[in-house]
Structure formats: C-alpha cells, structure tokens
Image (cartoon, rainbow, N blue to C red):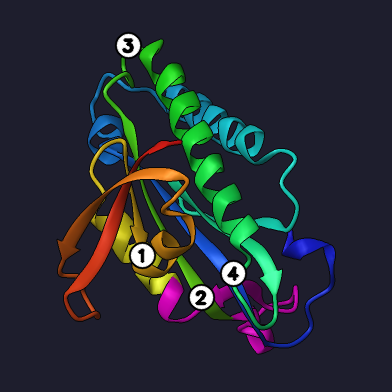
C-alpha cells in the first residue's frame, strides 16, 4: 500500500509499528479434522476482519501478511511521532481483537483462537529491499529497532493481550487502562513494557 506514494529509495520515517499474530493457530491447523478449504476460508475472513478494522484511518499500511498475522505501519512523519497515529493504532487493535473474537466464537473448530498484539513506535528505515534480485523493484518494507521490538512484544503477548513499548505508553497512558510489565526480550536489555487492557 506504501502510503499512496511511489517509493524508489530508502528513507527514514517515524511510524507506529503494529504486529498481530493468531495465538494457537499452528496447533489447530495441524489437526487432521481441519480441511484445507476450512483453513482458507478462516484466513480469508481474518483478512476481511483486519481490513474492516483499519477502514477510515489515514496513513496506514498493511505491509506484510505473515500467514497467521500482519505487520502494519501507521503514520508517515519524517521527524516525530504522531500521537494521533498512536491512538488510532490502539483503537484499531481493540476493534480488531473484538471482531476476531466474535468471529471465532461462532466457529466450532477455531473458537479457542485469539490474537496477541505488540506495538512500538520510532524511526524505521523504509523502502525497497532486494531490488537487484526482484523483477518488481524490490520488497517494500521497514526494518530497524522498533520493528524488531514490536515483533518481540508480540512474541511475549498471550491470548487477547496487547503489549506496547514504553514510548507508546508515554503518549497514550491518559487514554487507556494499563498494567506495567518487566520482560526480557531477545536482542534487548530488560525491557519495561505495558499491557493495554481497555480504552477510557
């Protein structure tokens, strides 16, 4: 989606990074009573729920489909964090979490699935990677510390849990209910993060 503009070279951007993962999905799809058509239908519905949940948000990009999750970027600022995009990201994941739960509750074979979500913010390097080897001009994505942090937070998130970095929390803590956590994340020193439990 690339924020509606052509990206020809690498650039530094300040963004909100959201990583969404379906908890327990691999175990469910490996069961012999789950058909390929059921898996396809479920994933297609997950796509639809995600797209519906981000509808109306400006400067948002679903950058990667990860099989049972998504990498999403919000905001498009060259020099600073957009508090507006941070709160939009929080509101979006609450909508997504609720709609996904409502959908799974109606599915006998998928009713125990839930989302784990990690959110970080900061400067990333964004643009085409691997261009010399890709006929389409390269894979347009973002890399850097805060992308890695969002993935690490998602890896620690339990079912129905939203974990954010300390920087995200500083910008939204008066608008949400939260619990402080101390986690050890691969590639990072002991990290203070926050579980966002509700919107105020």
Secondary structure beneath label 2: strand
- Which residue is identified by label 2? 122
Membership of 42 in magenta stretch = no
Q: Nearer the viewer, mark 3 or mark 4?
A: 4
- Which residue is identified by label 1? 165
Could you tell me how far apart the alpha carbons at marks 1 and 4 are, in whole angstroms? 13 Å
Mark 1 / mark 3, whichever is N-terminal: 3
Could you tell me how far apart the alpha carbons at marks 4 and 2 are, in whole angstroms? 6 Å
Residue 66 relative to residue 64: left or right: left
Residue 81 relative to residue 194: left or right: right
- The reply to whether discs 4 and 2 touch (Cβ–Cβ < 8 Å) is yes
Residue 86: quarter of image = bottom right
Q: Nearer the viewer, mark 1 or mark 3?
A: 1
Could you tell me how far apart the alpha carbons at marks 2 and 1 are, in whole angstroms? 10 Å
Q: Nearer the viewer, mark 3 or mark 2?
A: 2
Coordinates of residue 179 in the picture (x, y in percent): 24, 48
Whether 48 is drawn above or below 91: the answer is above
Secondary structure beneath label 1: strand
Residue in the foreground of this view, choosing between 58 and 69: 58
- Which residue is identified by label 4? 15
Query: Which residue is drawn at the image coordinates 54% and 41% (left, top)?
Result: 91
Could you tell me how far apart the alpha carbons at marks 3 and 4 are, in whole angstroms? 38 Å
Mark 3 / mark 2, whichever is N-terminal: 3
Instruction: Answer few, some or many: residues within 10 Å of disc 3's Cα (few below 14, many 20 plus, some between 14 and 19).
Output: few
What's drawn in magenta, residue-wise? 125-146
Whether residue 104 is visible to the viewer of this picture, yes or no, is yes
Q: Which mark is residue 108?
A: 3
């Amino acid at each position: 989606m690339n924020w509606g503009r052509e990206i020809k070279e690498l650039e530094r951007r300040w963004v909100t990074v959201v990583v969404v993962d379906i908890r327990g999905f691999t175990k469910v799809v490996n069961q012999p009573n789950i058909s390929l058509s059921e898996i396809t239908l479920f994933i297609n519905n997950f796509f639809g729920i995600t797209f519906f949940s981000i509808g109306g948000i400006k400067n948002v990009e679903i950058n990667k489909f990860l099989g049972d999750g998504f990498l999403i970027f919000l905001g498009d600022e060259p020099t600073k964090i957009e508090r507006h995009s941070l709160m939009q990201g929080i509101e979006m994941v609450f909508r997504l979490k609720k709609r996904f739960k409502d959908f799974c509750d109606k599915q006998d074979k998928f009713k125990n699935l839930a989302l784990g979500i990690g959110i970080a913010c900061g400067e990333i390097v964004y643009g085409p990677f691997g261009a010399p080897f890709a006929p389409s001009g390269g894979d347009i994505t973002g890399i850097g510390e805060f992308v890695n942090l969002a993935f690490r937070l998602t890896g620690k998130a339990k079912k129905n849990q939203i974990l954010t970095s300390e920087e995200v929390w500083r910008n939204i803590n008066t608008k949400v209910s939260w619990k402080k956590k101390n986690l050890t994340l691969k590639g990072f020193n002991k990290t203070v993060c926050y579980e966002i439990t509700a919107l105020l």
